[in-house]
Amino acid sequence: MLRQRVITAVLLLAVILPALFHERIEPFAALSLLLLAAAGWEWARLNGHGGATALPIGVGLGALLALAWWLGALEQSWRLLWLGAGAAWVMLAVVALGRGVDGWSRWPAGLRLPLGLFLLGCAWLAMVQARQIGLSFLLSVFLLVWTADIAAYFGGKRFGRRKLAPSVSPGKSWEGAISGLLGVCLLAAGWIWADGSGWGDQGSVYTRLWSYGALPAVLALLFLTAMSVIGDLIESLVKRSAGVKDSSQLLPGHGGVLDRIDALLPVLPLAMMLVTL
């Protein structure tokens, strides 16, 4: 299993990194569009659609995003969209997690599918526009989510006692979540210091939030870190409701695309919302 995970990770990096660091936006936009279309296919399957309908749904999501791209969506301001996506994620955090795993299947099928596709589309648009702002900005958002996850894992392993959401994700603890927040704060402090010392380009999400003042920046980091946990929990809830361990097997050894980007889905549009207020 470890060998399979490593091989898949190496192959993914070999494709993603050149697109991410390319001077033009098109390679990254196209690659991320394909990944989000695959995530749309996975979302359809997790919500009761078989192969005969799930594939057209994923392809349809990709086609709609490509059409939006062609119509100039990447050059538009989407402040209201980021607010709408943020409201949807907060609603999911309160209502879906409040109702638990059994409650998810009682949501109307006509709501679950389009809501998920809408949020996937928002994540793609936010991701590409974040890359347009600058590589430093996008990487700082990625690293916020990855740092929160890694710090939460090790903090939970060492100090975890009180379960965060035992019926949804038994491995998560409050101590792990707090460790994740502390890790993000340390990352932010280091990045802000580096930017202020001339090592960075002043383009990170941390420096931009810091420009609002210390208290708003800390509250924003708390919010983004909490929402990264929410993204992970929501996907775990949906998978448990569907009775599966992984969203798919598209990425051997890693599960599916949703398994890899779940925590990023709420953070990307919310980060864009916070820096474009």
Image: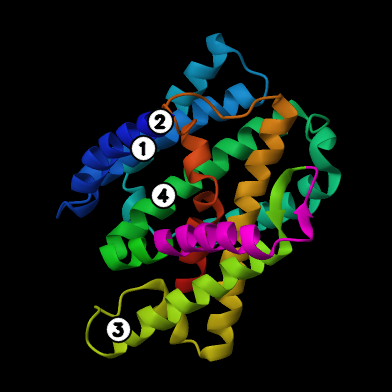
Secondary structure type for disc 4? helix
Which residue type carries mark 2?
Gly
For the N terminus, the quadrant is top left
Can the viewer see residue 276 in this picture? no
Q: Which mark is residue 125?
A: 4
Cα gap from disc 2 to disc 3, whole angstroms: 37 Å
Residue 159 spot, x, y in % from top left = 68, 65
Cα gap from disc 2 to disc 1, whole angstroms: 6 Å
Q: Nearer the viewer, mark 2 or mark 3?
A: 3
What is the crowding at mark 4: few (fewer than 14 residues within 10 Å), some, or many (at least 20)? Answer: many
* Magenta-drawn segment: 142-167
For marks 2 and 3, the one nearer the N-term is 2
Which residue type carries mark 1?
Leu
What residue is disc 2 on?
62
Asked if marks 2 and 1 touch (Cβ < 8 Å), the reply is yes
What residue is disc 1 on?
33
Which residue type carries mark 3?
Asp
Q: Which mark is residue 135?
A: none
Asked if marks 2 and 3 touch (Cβ < 8 Å), the reply is no
Q: Nearer the viewer, mark 3 or mark 4?
A: 3
